[in-house]
Image (cartoon, rainbow, N blue to C red):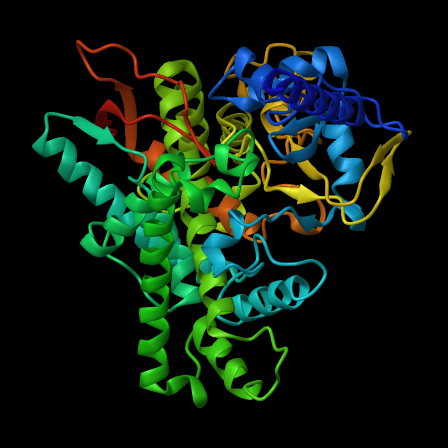
C-alpha cells in the first residue's frame, strides 16, 4: 500500500512540476526569449554557471543568444532584462515602466512601505516628493552655481590639505579606501539638505558609512538571494544577510531621526526654515490632520536616506575609479594635466567659464563612468500594466532589469570596450561629444535628480586633484586591481598610490 501511495505522490508532484515548467517556458502570449526557467530556481543556475557574483556579466553573455530583450526568472521573481541602450531609451522613458519594483525585502529599509525618492510609488506620492525635494533644494542652493561652487571650493581646499599632509607623513604613499571621498562629496549635498557640514574624519559618520558599505556589498539587483526569495528574510535572517542589513537600516534611520528631532526641538523651522529638513517639518505640521498625507516622519527619513546614499556613494566611487584608471594609464593623466594647466591658471580655482573648455577632463570622466560602471544594474523598474515591448508581451508586475554594464561594454558600439580611452568621447576637433549610450544616471522620470550636482562635483574634483597632484603606482608593489567590489554598486577595491605634489 505504501509504495502505491508514494508512487501516486511522486506522480502528482511530477505532473505539477511539468505543468509549472510548461507554463513558465511556453506561455500563450509571446514573451521575450530567454533561458529555460526551472521550477523553484528559475534561471539562477544558468546565471551562476556564467558568473556567480556578477550577474550583469551573465546577462550580457545570454544576450548573444536571446537578444536585447530577454526573459529570465530569479527564483520566484519574473523578470525581463533590457540589454541595449536603444531599448532602454525607448522603454524606460515610458509611463508604464516608470514605477519601481519594490518587494518586501526592498521595503525593509523604508518601514515596510514604498517611500522616498528611489523606491517611492509612481505616480504618487513619488511625484510630489520629487517635486518638493527639487524645489526646496533649489531654495537652499541646489542648481545655483555660485552657492554650490562655494561649498565645493571649501571641500576641495580640505581634500588638498589632507592629501598633502598624508603624503608628507607617509613618504608620498596614500591609502584610498572606498569611503575616502565620501564625506567630502556628501557635504556638498548635505549642506543644502540639512545645513550641516561634517569633518572628514567624523567618527559617527564614518561608522554609518561603514555599515552602509557593508549593506551595499551584501546584495545586488541581479541575483541576490533575498531578491529571488524575499520570504526567506524572516525565516533565515542571519544566513540570508538580512540581520546585517536590518542593523544598517536601524543605524541610518536612527541617524536621520535624531537630526529631525533636533530640528523639531529647535523650532526654527516654524518661522525661518534653514534647510530642506526644516521645510519638510513645516509641511508635516501643515498636513497633520490629513489621514493620507505623504508628509510624515517616515517619508522624511526615507528621503534623507536616499539623498545620503546617492549623494555620497556614486560620486565617491567614481572619483576613486578615476584615480585608479589614471594610475593604470599615465599618458591619459599627462594629457589631463596639460589641458588643466592650459585652461586654469596655476594656483587658482576653476570658474564656470572654464567648464566648457575642459574637453579632455569631461571625456575622461565619461570614460570613467563607462568602464567603472558604478551602477551596473539600474534601480529596479516594474511593468505597471500589461504591455508590449515591440512584439513581446510583458505581464504587469514583471521586474525590469536594465543591464547598464552590458551597454557600457558592448563591443559593437564601443569597439574596444575593455580599454580606458577617453578619446572615444572627443570629436575630430578635440571637443567633447556625448554618446547616447552613456547614461550613468538613468533614463526617463526615474533618472537621478542629483545628476547636475554630481557632474559638477566630479569635474571640479578631478580638475583640482590633477592640478595639484600626480598619481603613480606604489613602488615595489603590484599594480592595484581593477576588479570591482560587487554589490548594489560596483566599488573599487582599496588601493595604495604614490602621490607627488605638482610645483
Which image quadrant: the C terminus? top left
Q: Residue at x 44, y 51 (%)?
A: 311
As displayed, is residue 428 above or below residue 216? above
Return the x and y of residue 13 as percentages of the image width and height. 68, 24
Which image quadrant: the N terminus? top right
What count of labels does the image hold? 0
Task: Left or right? Give the position of 259 relative to 105.
Answer: left
> Viewer-proximal residue, 28 or 438?
28
Return the x and y of residue 191 as percentages of the image width and height. 38, 63
Q: Residue at x 39, y 20 (%)?
A: 334
As displayed, is residue 37 above or below residue 415? below
Q: Residue at x 20, y 44 (%)?
A: 161
Residue 424, visible in the rendered structure: no
Task: Left or right? Give the position of 373 relative to 157.
Answer: right
> Viewer-proximal residue, 307 or 248?
248
Which residue ends up furthest to the left in the rendered image?
169
> Viewer-proximal residue, 154 or 255?
255
Q: Residue at x 60, y 10 (%)?
A: 416
> Viewer-proximal residue, 392 or 7?
7
Which residue ends up furthest to the front in the rendered image?
1
As displayed, is residue 240 above or below residue 57? below
Return the x and y of residue 275 as percentages of the image width and height. 43, 73
Residue 360, visible in the rendered structure: yes
As displayed, is residue 58 above or below residue 96? above
Amino acid at each position: 500500500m505504501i509504495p502505491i501511495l508514494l508512487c501516486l505522490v511522486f506522480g502528482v508532484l511530477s505532473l505539477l512540476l511539468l505543468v509549472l515548467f510548461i507554463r513558465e517556458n511556453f506561455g500563450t502570449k509571446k514573451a521575450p526569449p530567454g533561458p529555460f526557467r526551472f521550477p523553484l530556481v528559475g534561471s539562477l543556475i544558468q546565471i551562476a554557471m556564467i558568473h556567480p557574483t556578477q550577474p550583469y556579466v551573465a546577462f550580457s553573455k545570454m544576450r548573444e543568444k536571446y537578444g536585447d530583450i530577454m526573459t529570465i526568472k530569479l527564483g520566484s521573481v519574473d523578470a525581463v532584462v533590457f540589454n541595449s541602450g536603444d531599448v532602454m531609451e525607448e522603454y524606460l522613458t515610458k509611463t508604464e515602466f516608470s514605477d519601481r519594483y519594490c518587494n518586501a525585502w526592498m521595503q525593509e529599509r523604508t518601514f515596510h512601505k514604498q517611500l522616498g525618492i528611489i523606491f517611492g510609488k509612481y505616480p504618487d506620492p513619488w511625484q510630489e516628493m520629487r517635486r518638493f525635494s527639487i524645489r526646496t533644494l533649489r531654495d537652499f542652493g541646489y542648481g545655483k552655481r555660485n552657492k554650490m561652487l562655494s561649498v565645493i571650493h571649501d571641500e576641495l581646499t580640505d581634500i588638498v590639505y589632507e592629501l598633502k599632509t598624508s603624503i608628507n607623513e607617509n613618504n608620498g604613499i596614500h591609502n584610498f579606501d572606498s569611503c575616502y571621498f565620501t564625506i567630502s562629496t556628501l557635504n556638498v549635498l548635505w549642506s543644502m539638505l540639512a545645513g550641516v557640514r561634517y569633518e572628514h574624519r567624523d567618527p559617527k559618520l564614518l561608522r554609518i558609512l561603514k555599515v552602509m558599505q557593508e549593506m551595499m556589498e551584501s546584495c545586488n539587483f541581479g541575483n541576490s538571494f533575498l531578491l529571488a526569495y524575499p520570504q526567506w528574510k524572516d525565516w533565515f535572517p542571519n544566513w540570508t544577510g538580512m540581520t546585517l542589513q536590518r542593523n544598517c537600516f536601524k543605524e541610518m534611520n536612527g541617524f536621520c531621526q535624531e537630526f529631525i528631532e533636533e530640528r523639531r526641538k529647535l523650532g526654527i523651522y516654524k518661522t525661518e526654515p534653514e534647510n530642506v529638513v526644516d521645510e519638510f517639518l513645516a509641511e508635516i505640521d501643515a498636513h497633520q490632520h490629513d489621514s493620507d498625507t505623504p508628509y510624515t516622519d517616515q517619508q522624511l527619513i526615507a528621503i534623507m536616506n536616499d539623498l545620503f546614499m546617492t549623494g555620497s556613494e556614486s560620486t565617491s566611487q567614481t572619483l576613486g575609479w578615476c584615480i585608479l584608471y589614471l594610475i593604470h594609464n599615465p599618458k591619459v593623466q599627462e594629457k589631463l594635466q596639460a589641458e588643466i594647466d592650459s585652461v586654469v591658471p596655476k594656483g587658482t580655482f576653476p570658474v564656470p567659464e572654464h567648464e566648457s573648455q575642459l574637453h579632455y577632463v569631461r571625456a575622461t570622466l565619461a570614460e570613467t563612468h563607462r568602464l567603472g560602471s558604478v551602477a551596473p544594474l539600474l534601480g529596479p523598474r516594474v511593468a505597471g500594466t500589461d504591455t508590449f515591448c515591440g512584439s513581446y508581451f510583458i505581464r504587469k508586475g514583471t521586474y525590469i532589469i536594465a543591464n547598464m554594464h552590458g551597454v557600457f561594454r558592448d563591443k559593437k558600439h564601443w569597439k574596444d570596450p575593455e580599454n580606458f580611452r577617453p578619446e572615444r568621447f572627443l570629436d575630430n576637433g578635440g571637443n567633447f561629444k556625448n554618446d547616447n549610450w552613456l547614461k550613468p544616471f538613468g533614463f526617463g522620470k526615474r533618472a537621478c535628480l542629483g545628476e547636475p550636482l554630481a557632474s559638477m562635483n566630479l569635474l571640479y574634483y578631478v580638475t583640482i586633484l590633477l592640478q595639484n597632484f600626480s598619481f603613480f603606482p606604489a613602488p615595489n608593489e603590484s599594480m592595484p586591481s581593477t576588479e570591482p567590489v560587487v554589490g548594489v554598486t560596483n566599488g573599487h577595491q582599496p588601493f595604495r598610490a604614490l602621490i607627488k605634489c605638482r610645483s
